[in-house]
Amino acid sequence: MATYTEANYSTPMESYRPANQPSTLSGVSQAPRQNSAGSNSPRGHVSFINKNKEEEKEKRQKYLTAKYGQHQMMLIRKRLAVEDWIYEQLRNLYCCKADEDDHDCNLDLEDILNLDTDAERREYAQTELKDAKLPQADINISDIHISKFWDQKRSIDMLIFCRDYLAVINPDFVIATGDLTDAKLLDRRGSQQFYEEWRLYRETVMSCKRMNHNITWLDIRGNHDSFDVPSHDHTKNLFRKYSFQGQTNPSSYHYKHVKPYGTYSFLAMDATPNPGPKRPFNFFGFLSDKEKAKVKRLKTETYESNKVVWFGHYTTSLIVTEDGQDVRALMRDGSAYLCGHLHTLADLVPKMYTLHKTGLLELELGDWKDNRKFRVLAIDHDTLSFTDTILGEWPAVIITNPVNAQLASPVDSPDKIKQSTHIRILVFSPFEILKVWVSIDGLDLGAPYHVQGPLYVLPWDPSKYATGIHEIKVTVEDGRFNYEEVIQPFSMDGSRPGFDILPRLVLMMNIYNFGKLVFQVLATLYIVILILLRRCDNVDRILVKTFRFRLLYYIITYVNMWIKRVWYVTRQQSTFYLLLGFMIYIWLGPWFVAEIIEGHVGVVFIWGMYVSGTFIPGSLTYIYGVFQIIIFNVPILLFLGYMIHYNSVSVETKQKAPSKWRKYRHIYIPFCAQVLLQTYVAITEFPKAYGTRAFLLGPVRTGSVILAFVLFYLNKDVRVKPKDSKGDQNKHRS
């Protein structure tokens, strides 16, 4: 271990300094070294104290030369030159800004002095100093939703978070991944940017920065931050004015975080549509060719970095690219992608993580809005670890070595764990840590010792866990008897446990393509079934009832009955062409015309929208298309078949027409219920978001109500005889 004596040998000996190292003594006297014998730390201790005066140095040199002799003094000076270099490296390593900053490191000075050349000494010391560095801690927060109408505690709790958590964790920076403000009207359907919300956001973060030494704040837009924004340069883009990156980085940007031991790149990808429509049609992200080219250019700046971490608002499953390529391929070389947007699906998926085939680890973070969630990230020896926690919960615990096998990035080699000598744990709490205990596979390893700050380490032998998946458990208790237990898998051979099916589906699926496919399949089936049934002359036995099981027999009978009812509808020429034409119109024609952005009228199709001279591909529109088929096209088809069949009962059984009350119960009430539902949708869905024009010029939603009445009128008196099999002439009106 290195022990630094109290003797103040501070004469500069530049000839003994390792090559290519800056002088620590040129123009400035060196601080004396303190003895570490009284330190509780098992490591060598370096302390930065006040410097001696020049005249005292010369006097001291003469005295020591006379006492020890010229040869002995050369050896002492050589030793001090090495110490000076180590001292300077430590100051740079820990970013010391004050002379009273203290740090520990594992260095054996005798080993360094016994090496033959300066190059060997430099290589040895650099390796040891790199291993001595403390992990880098950062914070990720998402979906803050500062609102002028709802939950004023969001900003108040942010201040508590800054005061209590950032002061303890002391992160290098905070990443805010979008939806900084809510931008919704009181009815929660309309949307616009509010100055009050953006001012409150900026004031809150400014207070946070004042509490935490002007901490770096990396924010990026979410879909709520781009509601009703015509362009990045428009005055309505309040993100550009009130956010902390907007003025210099209005869209995607690269933040290079330089540490003495490496460079770490954080790439912000802005996938919000430009222009930004009012809600709901910017729920999906859209990466234009222009923005994608910018992101690619930013990516080239990261090639020399130790690690690249991406962040943005949308999950990759909700980002549509103009060229149709998967956005995950763009992030292939990254370690992780930090995002928000889905709010963990209302906590149905509290841990929404997955590993993509490209090797990208996607980590969706729960919202601050309702759940006050945030993420603590740590980069330790170029390996990323994290924990998601909630405001008010202590302590926060991260096991940085061995890294979680499930969440290990493929770019991080398992050899790092194999070659490690210590289990490394970060424990954050404002209270005294009473207990930290480690066990692996149920076997207690003991209590790690405190190194510095939040870091605890425990020696271990990785070779004992060479194959398979193992489980490490860390138990922590603080002075307020807050208790935290962290259990995570690890492996040395690259084995990893799988992810749950639901987060994999949500994050790995291309939801845009899936929604598009579902709509096209439903619309195609609808059209094909109508055409095929119209060409049939008899549908009494479309499905043959030859099953031996009674249940299947009843099911087939029931299905045949409804096939026959739909066949009745297709035999009515006007009805057939109206239903067929309306489905084709939904697929190809405009849904409505309205102010998609205030002052900018746009046209919405299922395959996209034109607004402000820009085409934005359809995304959420396909989901609305599926909804339209489910709540109107299919129900009205089945209702018409039921009504014609009901009217035909008296013909088939040679009975009188049914009573009016019975007809009301079977025909009029169901029809009114369907019309009321469709009317409610037509009035409240798009008009609430885009104004009355969306109702008046809405051929799909408003047109559905009109079409329902037309179809009812055309078929309310239609009856079909049992022997009718051809053409539209075989129908009768009462």
Image (cartoon, grey):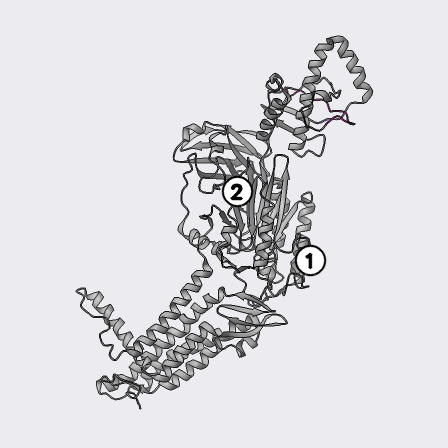
Q: Quadrant of residue 288?
A: bottom right
Residue under circle 2?
Answer: 386
Mark 2, secondary structure of its residue: strand
- What are the residue bounds of the magenta stretch? 23-36
Regarding residue 178, the answer to whether it shows in the image is no
Residue 304 at x, y = what percent? Answer: 59, 40
What label does residue 616 carry, if any? none
What amino acid does circle 2 point to?
A: Phe
- Specify whether 61 is left or right of 177: right
Q: Main secondary structure of the magenta part?
A: loop
Residue 28 vs 596, above or below: the answer is above
Residue at 65% x, 63% y is 194
- Would residue 32 be counted in the magenta stretch? yes
Regarding residue 56, the answer to whether it shows in the image is yes
> Exactly how many numbered labels are in the figure?
2
Residue 150 at x, y = what percent? Answer: 59, 61
Which quadrant holds the N terminus?
top right
Residue under circle 1?
Answer: 241
Residue at 22% x, 87% y is 654
What amino acid does circle 1 point to?
A: Lys
Q: CA distance from mark 1 to mark 2?
A: 32 Å
Mark 1, secondary structure of its residue: helix
Q: Residues within 10 Å of mark 2 (few under 14, many from 20)?
A: many
Residue 628 at x, y = what percent? Answer: 43, 71
- Would residue 600 be counted in the magenta stretch? no
Q: Residues within 10 Å of mark 1 (few under 14, many from 20)?
A: some
- Specify whether 684 is left or right of 502: right
Residue 586 at x, y = what percent? Answer: 45, 73
- Specify whether 599 is left or right of 319: right
